[in-house]
Amino acid sequence: MRNTAIGVVLVAAGLTLGGCKKADTGAGTDEIVVGEFVSLTGATASFGQSSDEGVRMAVDEINEAGGVLGKKIKLIIEDDQSKAGEAATVVSRLISRNRVVALLGEVASSRSLEAAPIAQQNKIPMISPSSTNPRVTEIGDHIFRVCFIDPFQGTALAKFALSRGWKRVAILTDVRQDYAVGLTEFFKKFFTEHGGTVVAEQSYSSGDKDFRAQLTSILAAKPEAVLTSGYYNEVGLIASQARELGLNVPLLGGDGWDSPSLVEVAGDAIEGGFMTNHYSSEDTSPVIQNFLEKFRKRYGHDPDALSALGYDSAMILADAMRRAGTTEAGPLRDAIAATRDFPGVTGRITLDENRNASKPAVILTIQNGKFRYVETIEP
Ligand code: PHE
């Protein structure tokens, strides 16, 4: 009780002294406060770290070029530790304590789905750089994304498998991730409607370490390829255990494979695997090469798709602020919704009436430990 009373007094004093609503942001009136929530630590730390590198590079570029509407962007970054429940907590805090005008995040669909209702309720525009599950933006009219969605990604992957002549595919899905469950569903739909057969279906949960029982069943079904629908950390182990058991057919996956850790964990076992992704660093277009050069100089390593998408999400937000002429939620929301033909690193970005982006996917293969470009699949 006593603590609460003191807290109220301090907050009230802060408001009176500061004379402004943004008492806790630490920002001056010449700053625009934007919240970013990502998994900087925990199971999918590489997602959050990569995305954050892209976001920070964009914000620094924006600020170095004079900022937006005469103000600098102040980025407040919250780590949700890849933990269920934590994205909701940090987003509530960014909204109520830091009074952010917009949110950038999350990578993983399950965490975006957790945070989006809070952003929507508070009418704070949220842009996910990379959550591909269709339900994310269905939460409400303040929720956007700058990436393609899984009905397209699953279809692209199924088309690719069929184009290679693989008609018998087994599927192993992380049932704890909305992303993985959706990707499997959309892959299966297109694949089975176009002559493919799913010869075995197995599941696991994020955090599992032993996949031998599922892989043994899959081996017995004699597939021509195996879709591992999940994130890089488990996929790395799955790949190693599959090879150990003598399951030597190509592995397929979605963007959830995208992490340098995949190759570190799986080593040779992931060689020859194929995945869908949002961009390829081998693309020779000037936009991508220019981005690569700046990114390498700043961080000393190559950007993955998450960095590119994080970068695009921040740039699109700044562009919308400029077009809105204000950071007030209503007009800002409308300006984000009106994004057309924005020249992103991950392609031209137009947001449709469902606040999603329609963009090509690339197929990459892992060759000598590197993600190599194979082909582009148009929407
Ligand atoms: N699309 C994944 C999801 O929605 C996240 C992801 C995007 C991971 C891009 C890697 C690269 O959960």
Image (cartoon, grey):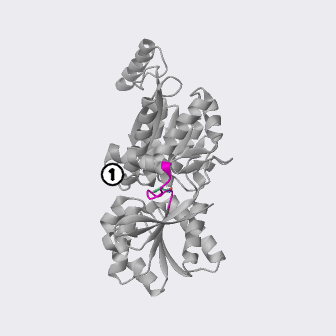
The quadrant holding residue 262 is: bottom left
Q: Residue 99's spot in the image, x, y percent?
A: 48, 29
Above or below residue 92? Residue 49 is below
Reply above or below: 22 against 273: above
| Mark 1 CB near ligand 1 (8 Å cut) | no
Q: Is residue 226 magenta?
A: no
206 sits to left or right of 115: left
Q: Main secondary structure of the magenta part?
A: loop
Q: Residue at x 44, y 39 (%)?
A: 58
Residue under the image location 49 percent in, 83 percent down: 223
Q: Quadrant of the C terminus?
A: bottom right
Would residue 281 be counted in the magenta stretch? yes
- Range drawn in magenta: 277-286
Residue 377 on image: x %, y %: 58, 64
Snapshot quadrant of residue 155: bottom right
Q: Nearer the viewer, residue 247 or 61?
A: 61
The amino acid on which the numbered mark 1 sits, given as a three-letter code, is: His
Helix, strand or loop under label 1 = loop
